[in-house]
Image (cartoon, rainbow, N blue to C red):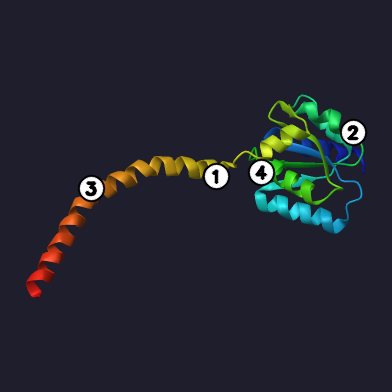
């Protein structure tokens, strides 16, 4: 890797660190290629990405970024899992770590807040952005549905009474 490629990689990593809602750092020593591809597929499905980069270059890219606190975790064979959604990467990483002993979460960052492994697990248990939006929409829509039901109830009661009266007259 020549100097120009390294500079380009540092720039790409810098953009990743700035744009990501959450970055998770983990050791992946001993994982097979198939296991890494499985992790990448799960992360892609959730809207995140996985990146393996040289620790020295990642530390250079972290300089001056909000998540610079993760530089301490960049030792050994590390992988970066990140997503714009502040919860997606943490959820996938936590779930994958439970099923694969070779994938060990070291910590991460959410904005300018450093996360230890317990912090990553806590973030993973939070509802995702889509789940929160669905909850808000259901809270907003519930009163309207109740009003519509209350307005329509007398009309349906009158209709059922009229149907019952018609059936009596026909009998």
The picture places residue 121, in percent across and down from the top left corner, at 72, 38
Q: Quadrant of residue 63?
A: top right
Separation of disc 4 and disc 3 at Cα? 41 Å
Mark closest to the chain's N terminus, 2 or 1: 2
Pointer 3: what residue? 151
Which mark, residue 56? 2
Mark closest to the chain's N terminus, 1 or 4: 4
Mark closest to the chain's N terminus, 2 or 3: 2
Q: Nearer the viewer, residue 25 or 155?
A: 155
- Cβ–Cβ under 8 Å for marks 3 and 1: no
- Cβ–Cβ under 8 Å for marks 2 and 3: no
Q: Quadrant of residue 72?
A: top right
Badge nearest the viewer, 2 or 3? 3
Mark closest to the chain's N terminus, 3 or 1: 1
The picture places residue 143, in percent across and down from the top left corner, at 34, 41
Pointer 1: what residue? 131
Mark closest to the chain's N terminus, 4 or 3: 4
Q: Say above or below: 123 vs 158.
A: above
Name the residue: 28% across, 44% down: 147
Q: Quadrant of residue 142?
A: top left
Tell me the crowding category of disc 2: few under 14, some 14 to 19, or many 20 or more residues within 10 angstroms, Cα based.
Answer: few
Pointer 4: what residue? 88
Q: How many marks?
A: 4
The picture places residue 165, in percent across and down from the top left corner, at 10, 65
């Amino acid at each position: 890797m020549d100097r120009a490629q390294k500079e380009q990689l540092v720039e790409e990593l810098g953009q990743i660190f700035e744009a990501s809602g959450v970055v998770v750092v983990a050791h992946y020593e001993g994982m097979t290629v198939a296991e890494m591809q499985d992790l990448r597929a799960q992360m892609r499905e959730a809207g995140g990405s996985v990146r393996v980069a040289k620790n020295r270059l990642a530390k250079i890219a972290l300089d001056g970024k909000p998540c610079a606190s993760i530089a301490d975790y960049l030792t050994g064979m590390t992988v970066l899992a990140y997503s714009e959604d502040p919860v997606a990467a943490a959820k996938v990483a936590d779930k994958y770590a439970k099923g694969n002993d070779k994938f060990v979460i070291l910590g991460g960052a959410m904005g300018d807040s450093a996360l230890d492994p317990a912090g990553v697990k806590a973030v993973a248990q939070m509802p995702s952005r889509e789940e929160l939006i669905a909850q808000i929409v259901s809270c907003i829509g519930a009163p309207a549905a109740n009003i519509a039901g209350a307005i329509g109830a007398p009309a349906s009661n009158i209709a059922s009474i009229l149907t019952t009266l018609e059936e009596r007259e026909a009998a």
